[in-house]
Every structure is written in structure tokens, then in C-alpha cells.
Image (cartoon, coloured by chain):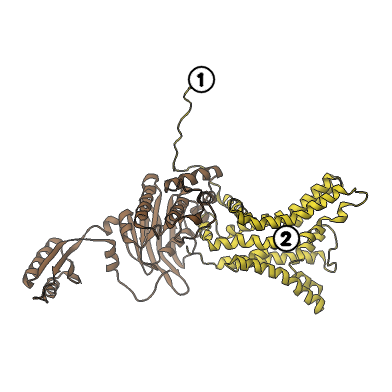
């Protein structure tokens, strides 16, 4: 029998804390993670999980189908990348990505202004700049779930079926391109959707605004280029297409608008991204948070 | 005693309102009550303390640091319980408190245990896994206090912490606030427009009116001390001018008199002289006394005595 009396009662209850603190970096991490959880409905009622689950399913199902095709049809009959290559894959899930961005940014930004959390956060080590950084990380990371995850799944599936890129170098280079593509799409859509979300205190209005912007911009671009026969550069106004056009260029493909140079596509995406950031910063720097 | 908050010539000008006007305030350790009517500038001072607003002019120092330039470092040491009763409804109390403790820099495991400990301290141990949206106003006020103390701040700022509470809940909340200070050495500044509760729990008081400081100091200095005498007379139908005659006699003798119906607050001379003077005036006028006693000064008197202005207001 033991009974040496090693057990002891550890004092419980509220006590002073003298240990280390993580500072602003820890605050950004915590707010980002909490925002991602809120967006995906983790730790929340089941009804909050419905839309994220639908968007994620729409984004991943094609990848699963294409990997299935690669498994079922021998490579000498049909090369998997003839069914769907990496940049072309986004064409199947563009709707899911746009809907997801219309869901994520309003949840991440608008909710805090409505439920008092913004003032709570700004009474912590965060200030407006670091708060927005945390939120941008959350939006980009969450969008990464649908912009980065499916092509990575495709790469892994093709690789397992011996239909992936040749050699380690080729495989790593493809992975780098997939990651760069996912980040580029996420960054542009995050900036634009955060800008729309910063302008209203209603999540529904923000979501509708994002969808309308994405739907209206290609119409405007087409009207200017095809209708009014202005410079093809006006295609860059099309936010629903330009991030995906950039992905083609990242994969050294001409894309849907070969008349646009890669540099102009890159510049167009940068302008959309930086413009979105500018709107968000302008809005939050003017916001009076008095309690 | 070192100052927790010190302001010099602090001005906060909003487009249409001067919320704070040349405010010189020193708030020491302990429990400090920030009192004033709605619009006195209490919330504006709290916002400046947290660095949520930048002052138009003047300076503010909190725990020896500037909220404007040392904001992140300073706010890690401050707990804040906002006035607004808006909280994320679908979040559980425990998750809310834990998350904010993490944001204030506590490691994850420490934040978890301290979230539970804080919620137990405020009496919500058994309720800690309930969603905030299902909680009563009193419980939500307690959750706000729990999150303010969870990260072990040096100083907590509570904006109207008893707002919306019934008398029993209010007493319980005030007792917890006092316990936080006395047992754990956490300094407290609480804003309130209910003067009795400030008198009950605070060591110090800062009184604001229309953005201006009208009094500050320890509770002993500002309230509780003798402030003249109070004389209540009987209104006599056969001698309708008796009370007026008493007032006239007192004023002519050099006393200050404030009349409210048949009740006279008499000041301006030592209490002993006031009693003698009142007795003589009552006898001379043929008045009849219902009650005579020493008047203990209260926070209410500070506001009654404060000069009022027609201009300006505060947010």
C-alpha cells in the first residue's frame, strides 16, 4: 500500500499572476484564432456551422471527384491534369470562394462593432492597427481553407496516384505556386470584402455588397472593354476574375485574357488589395470608440 | 501614495461638445468613485484612460505611463468593464473570459484556469458554461467584472458596474468589487451616477459636472463630516410667517440658510453657535421645532453646492 502522503491540496481560487505575458503578438494570435472559430461556427450552436460547411463542401467536392477520376481512369487513357489542372480548378469553385468571402469578412469585422467586442479588444494590448492585422490574418486564413486547401488536396491526390509533378523539385515548385495562388486570391478578396464590411454595421448588407461588387465588376469591365472598346486594361476592374487570372500567370499560363501583361495583372491585383486595405484603415481610423 | 491616474489641463473636445474641460485630477490607490450625472464626462475620462480616445489638449498619465504612447504595455495592466451591456450572445461566459485573458497575454492554460477562478469569484462558477445571451443583466454585469480581473490587472476600470441591477444584486456586486481591492490589491475606478453606492464602497471620489471637476479627495474629506445643522419646523396656521422670520433672523446673524419647505439647512458658523442661534431665532419667531440635528455632509451636497453653467455638456 502506498500511503506515503505525497498527495496535497493545491490552493484553488483567484490568485495573483506573476508569470510571463505574450504581449501584442499573443493578442493578435488569440483574436485571429477566435475569429476563425467564430466564422466556422466552432464552439457555437449548430446553426452557425451551416453556411461554412456548405461553402467548404462546394470547394472540396470537385477536388475529391477529380482525384477519384485519377484513381479510376488509367493515366495512359486520360492524364488527370487534362481533367483539371491547378489554375483551372478555381474555375469550378469560384462561386464557393466568393460566397465564402461574403460570409467570412462580415462575421469577422461587423460582429465586433455590433456586440461591443471592438471596444473590449481596444482596451487590451491591441490598438486599431494590430486589431485589424489580427482580423486580416483571420480572414485570409479562413479563405485559405477554400483557396488553398482544395488544390493542395488535388496535388496530394495526383501525387498518390503517380500523376503529380515530376521529381521533388517539380513537386515543391508546384506546391509553392499553389500556396502563392491561394494567398494571392485570399489577400485580394479579403481586402475587398473587409472594405465592404467596414462600411456598414449590418452583416447582411456587407455580404450583399460583396456579392454585388463581385457580380457588377465583370459587367462594368466588359461594358468598358467590349462595349465601349476602351483599353483592355479596364479588365483589371473585374475583381471576380483578376485574382484567378493572376493564378494562371503564376503557373506560367496565358489565362483568359492574354492581351493583358502579367505585370498589369499583378498590378491590378495589388491595387484591389491595397485599395481595400486603405478603405478599411480610413474607416477604422475615423471610428469613434468611446466605450 | 502613488497616483494611479493623473491628468493636467485635460481637454476633450468633440465636434459639438466639450466633454472634458481643463481637468486636473489625481486618483490614488484604492477604490475610487467617478461620479456625475449622465453626460458629466465620466465615460470620456475612462476612454482617455484606456487610450480609446486622444485628448484634444492637456496630459493624462495612467500607472506612470501615457495611454497615447504606451498603450499596449499599459492596457495589459488594466482591466475594463464597459457600460454597454452588449456582449457576444452565442459565446459561453467561460470562453469569453478565457479569450480576453489570452488577449491580455496570459498563456492558454493559465487563461483557462483563471477564467474559471474569476467566474467563481464573481459567483458564476456554476453558470460559467452558459451562453452569454441566456444570462440576466446581473449575470452579464458579473461576467464583465470577471473578464476585467481574469488577467490579473493592476487596475480595473468599471463603467457603471451596477447599472440595471436590483438592490440585492447591486449590494452583491459592490461587495465583490471591494473584495477585489481589499483581498487582491487591485486598484479600482468605478463610475456611477448613484451617489449612495459610491459613498458606501469608495475610498476616494472624483466628482464631475458638465466636463468640469467639482470635487476630488478622500471620502472622509468630502462626505461624512459635519456640515452645519438641519432644522425642521412645524408649519403653524396661526403664525404663517414664523418660518420666514426664523430664516430672516438667521441670515441677519450671518448664517447661510438653504430652505426646502419647512426644513432649513444652516451653515457658515461653528456648529455650537448655529445651535444657539437657531434656538434664539425659533424662540423669537414663536416657531415650533419638529427636528433639530447636525447635518452630515454627503456626496449629494457636493453637487448641490457646485456652480452650474448654461453652456457645455459632456458625452
In-image side of B196 versus B235 (left or right): right
For image coordinates 83% across by 57% down, the residue present is A251
Q: Position of residue A290 (x, y in %)?
A: 48, 64
> Residue A231: percent from the left, percent from the top?
81, 75
Coordinates of residue B159 in the picture (x, y in percent): 42, 59
Residue identified by numbered label 2: A96
User: Viewer-proximal residue, B156 or B63?
Assistant: B156
Tell me the subunit letter for badge 1.
Answer: A
Tell which circle, 2 or 1, labels the residue nearer the N-terminal end: 1
Q: Residue at x 47, y 55 (%)?
A: B135
Q: Which label sits on residue A1?
A: 1
> Which chain is indicated by disc 2?
A
Where's residue B147, x and y in %? 48, 51
Q: Is residue B117 found left or right of A200 in the rendered image?
A: left
Gap between marks 2 and 1 measured at Cα: 63 Å
Whether tag 2 and tag 1 are in contact, CB under 8 A, the answer is no
Q: Quadrant of residue A250?
A: bottom right
Which residue occupies the foreground of this view, A56 or B298? A56
Residue A249 figure quarter: bottom right
Q: Quadrant of the C terminus of chain B?
A: bottom left
Q: Is residue B47 visible?
A: yes
Q: Is residue B55 above or below residue B173?
A: below
Task: Please tell me which residue is depicted at 17% across the width and 68% down the height of the picture.
Answer: B264
In the rendered image of the structure, the colour used to display chain B is brown
**Residue occupying the far top of the picture:** A1
Up-down relation of residue B182 to residue A220 (above or below): above
The disc label shown at residue B247, or none: none
Amino acid at each position: 500500500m502506498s500511503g506515503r502522503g505525497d498527495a496535497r491540496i493545491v490552493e484553488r481560487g483567484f490568485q495573483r499572476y506573476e508569470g510571463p505575458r505574450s504581449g501584442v503578438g499573443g493578442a493578435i494570435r488569440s483574436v485571429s484564432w477566435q475569429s476563425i472559430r467564430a466564422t466556422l461556427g466552432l464552439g457555437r450552436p449548430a446553426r452557425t456551422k451551416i453556411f461554412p460547411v456548405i461553402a467548404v463542401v462546394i470547394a472540396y467536392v470537385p477536388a475529391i471527384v477529380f482525384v477519384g477520376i485519377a484513381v479510376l481512369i488509367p493515366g495512359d487513357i486520360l492524364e488527370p491534369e487534362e481533367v483539371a489542372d491547378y489554375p483551372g480548378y478555381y474555375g469550378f469553385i469560384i462561386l464557393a470562394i466568393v460566397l465564402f468571402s461574403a460570409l467570412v469578412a462580415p462575421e469577422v469585422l461587423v460582429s465586433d462593432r455590433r456586440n461591443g467586442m471592438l471596444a473590449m479588444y481596444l482596451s487590451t494590448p491591441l490598438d486599431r492597427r494590430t486589431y485589424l492585422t489580427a482580423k486580416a490574418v483571420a480572414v485570409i486564413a479562413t479563405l485559405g481553407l477554400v483557396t488553398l486547401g482544395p488544390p493542395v488536396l488535388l496535388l496530394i491526390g495526383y501525387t498518390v496516384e503517380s500523376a503529380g509533378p515530376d521529381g521533388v523539385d517539380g513537386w515543391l515548385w508546384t506546391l509553392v505556386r499553389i500556396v502563392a495562388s491561394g494567398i494571392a486570391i485570399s489577400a485580394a478578396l479579403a481586402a475587398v470584402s473587409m472594405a465592404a464590411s467596414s462600411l456598414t454595421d449590418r452583416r447582411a448588407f456587407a455580404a450583399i455588397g460583396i456579392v454585388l461588387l463581385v457580380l457588377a465588376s465583370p459587367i462594368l469591365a466588359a461594358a468598358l472593354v467590349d462595349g465601349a472598346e476602351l483599353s483592355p486594361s479596364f479588365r483589371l476592374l473585374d475583381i471576380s476574375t483578376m485574382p484567378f487570372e493572376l493564378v494562371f500567370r503564376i503557373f506560367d499560363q496565358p489565362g483568359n485574357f492574354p492581351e493583358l501583361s502579367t505585370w498589369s495583372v499583378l498590378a491590378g491585383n495589388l491595387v484591389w488589395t491595397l485599395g481595400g486595405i486603405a478603405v478599411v484603415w480610413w474607416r477604422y481610423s475615423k471610428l469613434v470608440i468611446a466605450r | 501614495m502613488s497616483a494611479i491616474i493623473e491628468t493636467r489641463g485635460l481637454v476633450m473636445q468633440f465636434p459639438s461638445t466639450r466633454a472634458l474641460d481643463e481637468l486636473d485630477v489625481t486618483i490614488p490607490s484604492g477604490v475610487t468613485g467617478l461620479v456625475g450625472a449622465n453626460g458629466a464626462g465620466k465615460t470620456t475620462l475612462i476612454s482617455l484612460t484606456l487610450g480609446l480616445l486622444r485628448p484634444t489638449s492637456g496630459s493624462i498619465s495612467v500607472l506612470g505611463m501615457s495611454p497615447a504612447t504606451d498603450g499596449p504595455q499599459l492596457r495589459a495592466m488594466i482591466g475594463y468593464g464597459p457600460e454597454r451591456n452588449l456582449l457576444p450572445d452565442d459565446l459561453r461566459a467561460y470562453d469569453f473570459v478565457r479569450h480576453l485573458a489570452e488577449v491580455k497575454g496570459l498563456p492558454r492554460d493559465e487563461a483557462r484556469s483563471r477564467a474559471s477562478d474569476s467566474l467563481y469569484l464573481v459567483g458564476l462558477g456554476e453558470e460559467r458554461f452558459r451562453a452569454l445571451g441566456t444570462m440576466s443583466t446581473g449575470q452579464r454585469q458579473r461576467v464583465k467584472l470577471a473578464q476585467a480581473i481574469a488577467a490579473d490587472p493592476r487596475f480595473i476600470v468599471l463603467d457603471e458596474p451596477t447599472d440595471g441591477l436590483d438592490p440585492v444584486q447591486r449590494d452583491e456586486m459592490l461587495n465583490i468589487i471591494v473584495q477585489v481591492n481589499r483581498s487582491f490589491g487591485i486598484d479600482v475606478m468605478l463610475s456611477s451616477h448613484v451617489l449612495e453606492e459610491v459613498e458606501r464602497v469608495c475610498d476616494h471620489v472624483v466628482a464631475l459636472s458638465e466636463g468640469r471637476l467639482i470635487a476630488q479627495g478622500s471620502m472622509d474629506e468630502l462626505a461624512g463630516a459635519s456640515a452645519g445643522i438641519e432644522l425642521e419646523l412645524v408649519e403653524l396656521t396661526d403664525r404663517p410667517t414664523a418660518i420666514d422670520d426664523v430664516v430672516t433672523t438667521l441670515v441677519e446673524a450671518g448664517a447661510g440658510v438653504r430652505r426646502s419647505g419647512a426644513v432649513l439647512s444652516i451653515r457658515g458658523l461653528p456648529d455650537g453657535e448655529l445651535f444657539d442661534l437657531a434656538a434664539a431665532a425659533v424662540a423669537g419667531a414663536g416657531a415650533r421645532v419638529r427636528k433639530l440635528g447636525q447635518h452630515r455632509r454627503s456626496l449629494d451636497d457636493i453637487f448641490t453646492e457646485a456652480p452650474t453653467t448654461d453652456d457645455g455638456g459632456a458625452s
